[in-house]
Amino acid sequence: MEPKLSDFGLAKTLQMEETKVFTDVGGTIGYMDPEYITHSKLTCASDIYSFGVVVLQLLSGRKVIELDIVPRDSLTKKTFLRHN
């Protein structure tokens, strides 16, 4: 496992004059804030959540989420849509 640090700057403070913001957010399941996955809203807390997941992974020496434990065939449509 090779630890890498990155800029999590997904959440940006918006000017009050801005009424609409369009963004294309990419992320890895397990590192993305569950609030974003369910409500599609990024906040500063989203960055803190992702950073916390990385810190936990570094301290434990293990991956926080193992995506390989669920066979691809057993994913339901609801689970797929929730994570994509």
Image (tube, rainbow, N blue to C red):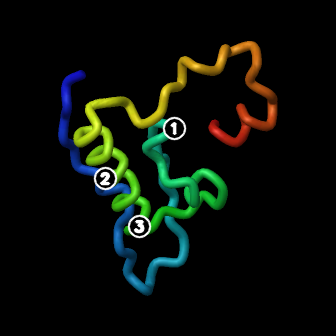
Distance between the alpha carbons at the discs numbered 3 and 2: 10 Å
Asked whether 15 or 60 is in front, the reply is: 60
Distance between the alpha carbons at the discs numbered 1 and 2: 14 Å
Question: Residue at point 51% right, 38% down?
Answer: 29
Question: Residue at point 51% right, 58% down?
Answer: 22
Q: Tag 1 or tag 3, which sits nearer the N-term? A: 1
Q: Quadrant of residue 36?
A: bottom right
Image quarter in which the N terminus is found = top left
The residue at which mark 1 appears reads as: 29
Q: Residue furthest bottom?
A: 16
Q: Position of residue 82 (x, y in %)?
A: 70, 42
Total numbered circles = 3
Asked whether 10 or 51 is in front, the reply is: 51
Image quarter in which the C terminus is found = top right
Q: Quadrant of residue 81?
A: top right
Q: Secondary structure at mark 1?
A: loop
Do the residues bearing badges 3 and 1 touch, measured as CB atoms within 8 Å? no
Q: Tag 2 or tag 3, which sits nearer the N-term? A: 3
Q: Please, what is the three-letter code of the amino acid marked with disc 1?
A: Ile
Q: Position of residue 38 (x, y in %)?
A: 66, 55
User: In the image, which disc is placed on residue 45?
Assistant: 3
Do the residues bearing badges 3 and 2 touch, measured as CB atoms within 8 Å? no
User: In the image, which disc is placed on residue 51?
Assistant: 2
For label 3, count other residues whose C-alpha is less than 10 Å away and answer few (under 14), some (14-19) or many (20+). few
Q: Secondary structure at mark 2?
A: helix
Q: Residue furthest front?
A: 60
66 relative to 73 in the view: left or right? left
Q: Please, what is the three-letter code of the amino acid marked with disc 3?
A: Ala
Q: Please, what is the three-letter code of the amino acid marked with disc 2?
A: Phe
